[in-house]
Image (tube, grey):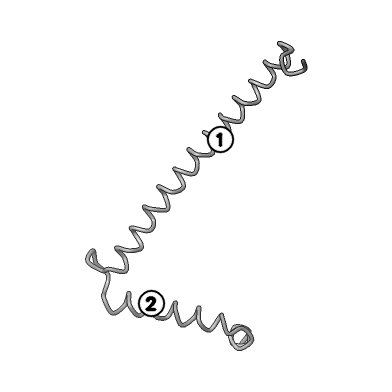
């Protein structure tokens, strides 16, 4: 009863529910197997997300390294006195 009220109050929720029902219908009509295009797309998206996460983690490490290098260079310049002159 509570979910019925939520669906009536929010038209975007109706679109989401219909989309999910369509996906379930596509999965059920094709059956479960390796040649199911929906499952192939989901698997492809999972792999791409893993690669993206790994790339972002590597980029984050590189940016921290760059920041540490710049910070170290500033400290060296301060110690040598070349920045304050």
- Residue at 53%, 84% (x, y): give it: 14
In screen coordinates, is 32 left or right of 57? left
Residues 83 and 49: in front is 83
Q: Position of residue 42 (x, y in %)?
A: 36, 63
Circle 1 sits in a helix, a strand or a loop, which is it?
helix
Circle 2 sits in a helix, a strand or a loop, which is it?
helix
Please state, as top left, top right, bottom left or bottom right, where the N terminus lies in the image: bottom right
In screen coordinates, is 84 left or right of 26? right
User: Is the residue under label 2 in contact with that under label 1 (CB below 8 Å)?
Assistant: no
Residue 44 appears in which quarter of the rendering? bottom left
Q: Dot 1 surroundings within 10 Å: few (below 14), some, or many (20 or more)? A: few
Residues 81 and 54: in front is 81
User: Which residue of the protein is positioned furthest toward the front in this rendering?
Assistant: 85
Residue 11 appears in which quarter of the rendering? bottom right
What number is the disc on residue 45? Answer: none
Q: Position of residue 83 (x, y in %)?
A: 73, 18
Write down the residue under mark 2: 24
Residues 64 and 1: in front is 64
Please state, as top left, top right, bottom left or bottom right, where the C terminus lies in the image: top right
- Residue at 69%, 16% (x, y): give it: 77
Q: Nearer the viewer, mark 1 or mark 2?
A: 1
Q: Position of residue 76 (x, y in %)?
A: 67, 15
Write down the residue under mark 1: 63
Image: 73 above or below 4: above
């Amino acid at each position: 009863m509570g979910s019925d009220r939520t669906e009536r109050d929010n038209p975007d929720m109706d679109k989401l529910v219909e989309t999910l029902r369509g996906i379930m219908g596509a999965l059920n009509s094709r059956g479960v197997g390796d040649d199911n295009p929906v499952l192939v797309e989901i698997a492809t998206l999972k792999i791409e997300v893993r690669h993206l996460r790994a790339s972002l983690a590597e980029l984050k490490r590189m940016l921290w390294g760059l920041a540490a290098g710049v910070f170290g260079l500033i400290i060296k310049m301060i110690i040598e006195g070349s920045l304050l002159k």
